Amino acid sequence: MKKFRNIVLSLTLLVIILVSSGYSRSTTTSQNSEEVAVLENKQNQTINLFVTHGHCSTPFAGIVDDLKVSLQKRTDLGNPLEDMKISFEVDPNSFNVCAGDDLTSRIKTPGLFIGMNNEKITFRSTNVYTMGLDWYQINGKMSIKGIEKDVKLFATGIRDSKDTMSSLLVLEGQMNLFDWGIDYDKIVNGKSDTVPTKLMYINMKIKIH
């Protein structure tokens, strides 16, 4: 019985040592990982957007400035973008609707996205969560007309099956304009709607490698 107890204690001690060393090794790797800027101050990147009240949409595009993407240098084969940081600015004066000048002028209605001080729409990531293989949830802060709110975006890394690093990053998300106090119908059409145009979607394809 004493011999059996000694064997059990020895095995338990061995498991504790292995778990502790494994945790220490992973923690050290994370702490010592090097941050690498894959994009810095990139200009004239295009972002696609549309606003909708559910069944009718107005698509438009804008120009992104000061696009920055940085990653943690990895030595393993894990998801390559799981520690990314991303930030960008969009000038609402650059918004353009391909359907014509009339819709472009509506999107550029003062007070909608263009504030009194011509503030840019900005985004900066705060946390990134891995949702699956090359699929990420990016939490961050988005500012419209100088008002900053929490948003949740999703990103997909696209890479060849033989590559360890993604070559493209597709960023997309949905937000409620009411969070920024923006009543699209009242600002553009002069009165609020019972079925408000409150949702805005964004989509951006970023070449990172």
Image (spheres, grey):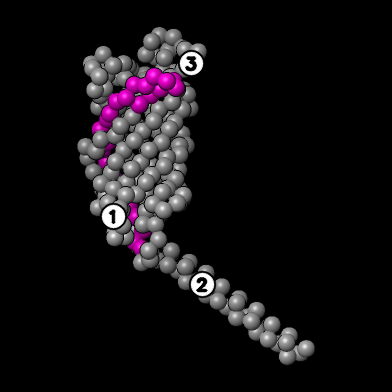
Farthest front residue in view: 161
In the depicted view, which residue is nearer to us: 206 or 156?
156
Label 2 belongs to which residue? 22
Q: Earlier in the sequence, mark 3 or mark 1?
A: 1
Instruction: Report the residue at 32% width, 49% height from top.
Output: 158
Label 1 belongs to which residue? 160
Identify the amino acid type marked 2. Answer: Gly
What is the x, y in percent for residue 22? 51, 72
Q: Which mark is residue 180?
A: none
| C-alpha distance separating marks 1 and 2 | 31 Å
Residue 36 visible somewhere in the drawing: no
In the depicted view, which residue is nearer to us: 129 or 151?
129
Identify the amino acid type marked 3. Answer: Val
Identify the amino acid type marked 1. Answer: Asp
Whether the magenta-drawn stretch holds residue 60 is answered as yes
Q: Is residue 129 above or below residue 20?
A: above
In the depicted view, which residue is nearer to us: 159 or 58?
159
| C-alpha distance separating marks 3 and 2 | 55 Å
Instruction: Report the residue at 60% width, 76% height from top.
Output: 16
| C-alpha distance separating marks 3 and 1 | 43 Å
Decide if residue 60 is on the left or right side of residue 55.
Answer: left
Q: Earlier in the sequence, mark 3 or mark 2?
A: 2
Of badges 3 and 1, nearer the viewer stands 1
Label 3 belongs to which residue? 195
Per the rendered image, the range of residues in magenta is 50-74
Instruction: Report the residue at 25% width, 19% height from top.
Output: 99
